[in-house]
Image (cartoon, grey):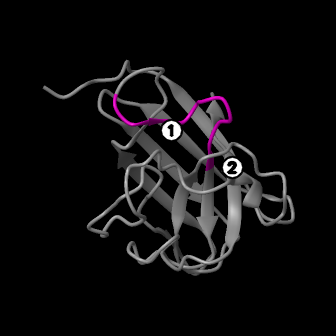
């Protein structure tokens, strides 16, 4: 039988660019077996962008290094296609159109908002952050799939 989390927890993140401009929003809701996320961005370079949940809820420096590495909690190597992975924070790439806008809806069973249940906890003592990278994630290369610089960051907080 699959372990289930209590449903209903909800959160959001305001996505900021390195210069501090608001460029998007992410919302997320706890489901019985994982978290459903919706992401909307603007003013990004057209094309694919790597997107990950990072282990620390801190976007205070312009390079967003304060968000730490991906949420992993020992789940494996980086990459949705890596035989040793994925890490809990690995997500599919985000597509951004020619107008600089992107939208995605993603479900992951590797994280949780709820205090108990399956997946790595996002609302732990130091929180978590959603980070978008400049390049696509190849879902195999270590440590970040070749996704490059961090171009957007949002602290994942309770809504």
- Looking at the picture, does residue 58 appear above or below residue 18? above
Does residue 125 belong to the magenta stretch? yes
Question: Label 1's element?
Answer: strand
Q: Is residue 78 left or right of residue 64?
A: left
Q: What main secondary structure does the magenta stretch of the protein show?
A: loop
Residue underneath mark 2: 154
- Looking at the picture, does residue 57 appear above or below residue 54? above
Tell me the tag on residue 96: none
Q: Is residue 60 left or right of residue 71?
A: right
Query: Residue 37 placed where, x, y %?
Result: 46, 45
Query: Residue 4 placed where, x, y %?
Result: 28, 24
- Looking at the picture, does residue 94 appear above or below residue 6? below
Query: Residue 15 placed where, x, y %?
Result: 70, 53
Image point (66%, 29%), residue name:
125
- Magenta residues span 118-129
Query: Residue 18 placed where, x, y %?
Result: 81, 65
| Quarter in which the N terminus is drawn | top left
Q: Nearer the viewer, residue 24 or 1?
A: 1
How many C-alpha atoms fall within 10 Å of the one at disc 2: few (<14), some, or many (≥20)? many
Does residue 138 belong to the magenta stretch? no
Image point (34%, 31%), residue name:
118
- Looking at the picture, does residue 26 appear above or below residue 142? above
Question: Label 2's element?
Answer: strand
Residue underneath mark 1: 28
Q: Nearer the viewer, residue 154 or 140?
A: 140
How many C-alpha atoms fall within 10 Å of the one at disc 1: few (<14), some, or many (≥20)? many
Residue at the front extreme of this rendering: 74
């Amino acid at each position: 039988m699959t372990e289930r989390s209590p449903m209903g927890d909800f959160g959001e993140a305001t996505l900021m660019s390195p210069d501090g401009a608001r460029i998007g929003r992410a919302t997320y809701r706890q489901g019985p077996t994982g978290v459903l996320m919706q992401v909307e961005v603007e003013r990004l370079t057209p094309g694919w962008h790597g997107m990950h949940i990072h282990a620390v809820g801190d976007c205070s420096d312009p390079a967003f290094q304060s968000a730490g590495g991906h949420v992993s909690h020992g789940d494996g190597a980086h990459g949705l296609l890596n035989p040793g992975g994925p890490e809990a924070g690995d997500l599919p790439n985000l597509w951004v159109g020619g107008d600089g806008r992107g939208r995605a809806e993603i479900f992951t069973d590797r994280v949780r908002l709820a205090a108990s249940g399956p997946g790595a906890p996002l609302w732990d003592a130091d929180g978590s952050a959603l980070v978008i990278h400049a390049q696509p994630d190849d879902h195999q290369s270590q440590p970040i799939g070749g996704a490059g610089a961090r171009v957007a960051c949002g602290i994942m907080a309770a809504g």
